[in-house]
Image (cartoon, rainbow, N blue to C red):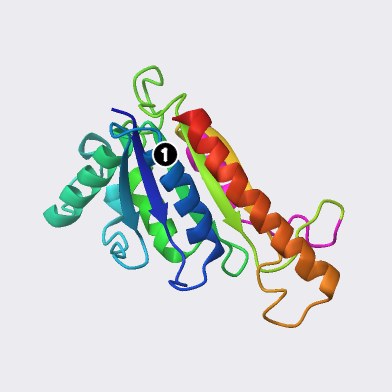
Amino acid sequence: MPILLHLDSSADLATSRSRSITAAFADAWQDLGADHTVVHRDLHRDALPHLSDASLHFPARLRPAGATPAKEQEDLQDSLIAELTGADVVLIGVPLYNYSLPSTLKAWVDYIHVPAVTAPFDDPATQQPMAGRTAVLVSTRGATYDAGSPTEFNDHAIPALQLILGNALGMNVETIVATRTLTERFGGPAEEVAKQHAELAAALEAAAAAAKRLG
């Protein structure tokens, strides 16, 4: 039973581009058969509490002496990690907020990135349960970040997730990108609006194709 973990983080519940693209992926995944399951977690509607204790960044055996994190947060962390490790593919909507991740998505990252549990520490061979699985990052950005432009390197969301999911967790990271999402709203030039629509259409097609390929 192939399982897709689908995470949304956009605060825009009506016109979000990242939500529309992740939905296209999830719909195509479910269309592959009744055995294809989607576990959906909406990190905006059901926001996770931020870690209340720094010791939760580590498993119990690596925590400082006397560390007593709240049991409810330990239980939540365990459930989030189980949800992650139970997935064959992870799909994440990553709108660019102030050049970085939405805080709701960053909170999820803080729960699931745990050395010696999901990332290597003292036994790399057994501490990357997600190694080799695929994470699909749907990156939507209000402005332009074209190669060679002055803003090319102003996206600090995808690089951070590549470090966590790719380097630390050992996942294969793929990206689907749509930029210029605010161009039409703020009266941008017609050619830029056309590029916005073309990028969105291409991203929707890419999402459906990726779901079929990965499922």
Q: Which residue is drawn at 39% across and 27% down?
A: 128
| Residue 23, horizontal then vertical, whole percent | 45, 53
User: Left or right: where does residue 111 sit relative to residue 161?
Assistant: left
Residue 70 can be seen in this image: no
Magenta stretch, residue numbers:
149-167
- Residue 23 position (above or below residue 50): above
Displayed quadrant of residue 100: bottom right
Which residue ends up furthest to the top in the rendered image? 125
| Residue 177, horizontal then vertical, whole percent | 64, 51
- Residue 101 position (above or below residue 182): above
User: Left or right: where does residue 7 sit relative to residue 16?
Assistant: left
Label 1, residues with CA under 10 Å away: few <14, some 14-19, many ≥20: many
| Residue 130, horizontal then vertical, whole percent | 39, 29
Q: Nearer the viewer, residue 190 or 151?
A: 190
Residue 136 can be seen in this image: yes
Which residue ends up furthest to the left in the rendered image? 71
| Residue 208, horizontal then vertical, whole percent | 53, 42
Which residue ends up furthest to the bottom in the rendered image? 187
Displayed quadrant of residue 180: bottom right
Q: Label 1: which residue?
A: 29
- The kind of residue tagged 1 is Trp
User: Left or right: where does residue 203 sit relative to residue 119?
Assistant: right
- Residue 186 position (above or below residue 40): below
| Element assignment for label 1 | helix
State yes or no: residue 166 in magenta: yes
